[in-house]
Amino acid sequence: MTELIPWLNAMVTLVTVVLMLVRFRRVDMRQTKLLDHQEKVAQLQANESVVRTEHTLNVTVDIDVIECDTPGGKAWILETNVELVNAGRDTTCVPAVYVRARALMDPERNIGTDDAGFYNSDFDALPKCGALSEPRNLAALPNSIIQIAPGEVEQFVRWDWLGQGFVQKFPVLVVNVEVFGADHKLLGHWSKGGEGEGDYRPGWLDYVNGPERTDDRFHRAIAFSRASPNDSNVSNGSVKRGQRVLLIPGTSKIDVQRTEQFREVLNGVVQWSRQMTIVLSNKIKGAAEMAAPPASLKDAVAGSQRST
């Protein structure tokens, strides 16, 4: 019996050691998981920090309709306010803030009283509504580029006047806002730490303002786009599919020369889009009676009433 005691002591010691190793292993695994979690959190924070240092603009659109008395009768001003707040950690250049509108419904479209279905959600496919459908670059400056520092707020406004005939023909509008931000290091101007400007700033100012600062076509048509897979310039290798490009002002053709000239700028351009639907009958007192439905729809409603 006495011979078994040393053996039993050895077994107890061995079991104790094994249990301690298991416990230490569990603690080590928990610490490893904790470290992995902390590392992932740190990585996410680092990624967020990188994103925040790039272009981060909060875009808010507010639309109002202002009634005016004119010698010809009632008229209204459509006021579109665009507010940009730089929520990032770096200054952002804003070369363009485009605002335009289209009619939600085609006034000539014949819709039966029992008809329903999916309506076109492509803004560019909606019917145009006169001058309101012509883009205006609200960020256009004669010889400079808008730049917004971190925490800074910038506001832009477009005014359009509406006559009674317009309200009757286009009772519902969709207002589209396109904001384009670019790298301050390439297009910006700074004085802190010495006077300086981005390498592409002089060339960009000449481009967007035209020869001798007299050509404003850039500010009356959206100049930024993406290269379509079916574009001939993609087929011949001049540009890559989906690449950010510049268009020849007033056309849908890619300006290959300018796109190549500002390739570094375009690679860092970020776009923000907003759309708002405006029912003029809700904004204009008495517009519900004034904005009568088009003849085709009126006839359909009358026919439906006669058949009941």
Image (cartoon, helix red, strand yellow):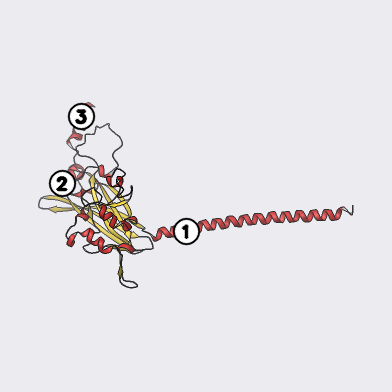
Outermost bottom residue: 194
Instruction: Decide: few, some or many residues near mark 2? Use Cα within 10 Å; few <14, some 14-19, many ≥20.
Output: some
Q: Cα distance, mark 1 to mark 2?
A: 55 Å
In the foreground, 156 or 201: 201
Q: Nearer the viewer, mark 1 or mark 2?
A: 1
Q: Residue 158: image x %, image y %?
A: 22, 55
Viewer-side residue, 190 vs 294 = 190
Residue position for label 3: 303
The image quarter in which residue 187 lies: bottom left
Amino acid type of the residue tagged 3 in the rendering: Gly
Q: Is residue 52 left or right of residue 289?
A: right
Crowding around mark 3 (Cα neighbors within 10 Å: few <14, some 14 to 19, many 20+) is few
Farthest front residue in view: 236
**Disc 1 or disc 3, which is closer to the eye?**
1
Where in the figure is residue 4, as x and y percent of width and height?
A: 86, 52
Q: In this view of the protein, can residue 63 be seen by the observer?
A: no
Q: Which mark is residue 164?
A: 2
Q: Residue furthest left?
A: 71
CA distance separating discs 1 and 3: 64 Å
The residue depicted at 23 percent of the width and 46 percent of the height is: 102
- Identified by mark 1, the residue type is Gln
Q: Residues within 10 Å of mark 1 (few under 14, many from 20)?
A: few
Q: Gap between marks 2 and 3, in whole Å?
A: 27 Å
Q: Quadrant of the C terminus?
A: top left
The answer to whether one can see residue 166 in this image is yes
| Tag of residue 137 | none
Q: Of helix, strand and loop, which one carries label 2?
A: helix
Q: Which residue is mark 1?
A: 45
